[in-house]
Amino acid sequence: MATSASAKLSKDVKQQYMDLPQGDKVQAMYIWIDGTGEGLRCKTRTLDSEPKSIEDLPEWNFDGSSTYQSEGSNSDMYLIPSAMFRDPFRKDPNKLVLCEVFKYNRKPAETNLRHVCNKLMDMVHNQYPWFGMEQEYTILGTDGHPFGWPSNGFPGPQGPYYCGVGADKAYGRDIVEAHYRACLYAGVQICGTNAEVMPAQWEFQVGPCEGINMGDHLWVARFILHRVCEDFGVVASFDPKPIPGNWNGAGCHTNFSTKEMRDEGGLRYIEESIERLGKRHNYHIRAYDPKGGLDNARRLTGYHETSNIHEFSAGVANRGASIRIPRTVGQEKKGYFEDRRPSANCDPYAVTEALIRTCLLNEEGDEPTEYK
């Protein structure tokens, strides 16, 4: 299996330099979503002291013509700090800084979906919307071949790998453990992880997060995963169907609730939301992957624990439905529901915004409403 050349460099030599004192200075790594809506970029600046809040972080800029976000003749883009985390790679007092991207005219960049999402979350803050997202991904070599798979063939069929234990069932656990601990250190609300159905496929869960925090924490968890994989010389893929054929795809199942749904008798509000979602299926499919549904079409076939992309369905404990109501929720008549349609490479800001628009703002039709 192909791994990167940089992963073969001596980490012991690097550590000699990482152990050097840095005085009172702080390294802040600014992170942003590029023009693909999927890729992440980062760069670092030195601060004179440790920032205690977002307000302590300066704006910055970058060359948008090199990130698919602007033309070379007018390439400056602005980075506006939006969320701050501890840096698990450089360690305290250094920071990871998730940023929104704005164009030269101070309008949000096309792939800055956080800006509108945040406004909508503010509109419904009194309903206390909680989210939990289950991020599936596949570990690949730098040649695109799944980690641990035979170079000229396939592993045994699916069955023993989901939550599997053992060298012949769990491929790449070191990466998973490193990512989990790094997220905990950073302050990401990661709440679990497990091996998935396809070998070399894993999942981590983030949540419960309220409002805009869902998108912030999932994007930073993805960034940390990419950095961990970089250190190991492999690649984390969020492609919703990385291997064609009789292998599971990768999704980002999204769990959602409001205070009303979590309170006694909340099942009524869950069912009302599901009814609204059923009338707006096409809008959600477009919002649930960065290519307007084209990526998800490879995954949502009605097979391999998915629903059919052209049909809306809901059911208790049904993993072949668009919306699953967990069995305990059906029994207790309160709780949350799971939207199983979002793809692994979805933008969590787009997914959570779509749920807010349909379930809480009662929007209808195939286009989002504009609010002043």
Image (spheres, grey):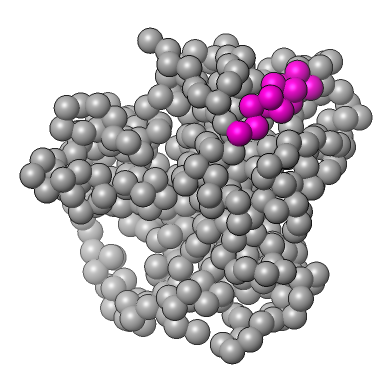
Q: Which region of the structure is painted magenta?
A: 271-282
159 falls in the magenta region:
no
Count the marks: how many? 0
Q: In the rendered image, is residue 167 in sight?
A: yes
Q: Left or right? Give the position of 96 relative to 24.
A: right
Q: Left or right? Give the position of 50 relative to 302.
A: left
Q: Determine the residue positioned at 44% across, 78% down.
A: 143
Q: Determine the residue positioned at 60% across, 51% down.
A: 297
Q: Position of residue 224 (x, y in %)?
A: 44, 55
Q: Which quadrant would residue 338 be assigned to in this image?
A: top right
Eyeballing the image, is 264 above or below 70?
A: above
Eyeballing the image, is 253 above or below 303?
A: above
Q: Quadrant of the C terminus?
A: top left
Eyeballing the image, is 330 above or below 189?
A: above
Q: In the rendered image, is residue 173 in sight?
A: no
Q: Position of residue 313 (x, y in %)?
A: 78, 36
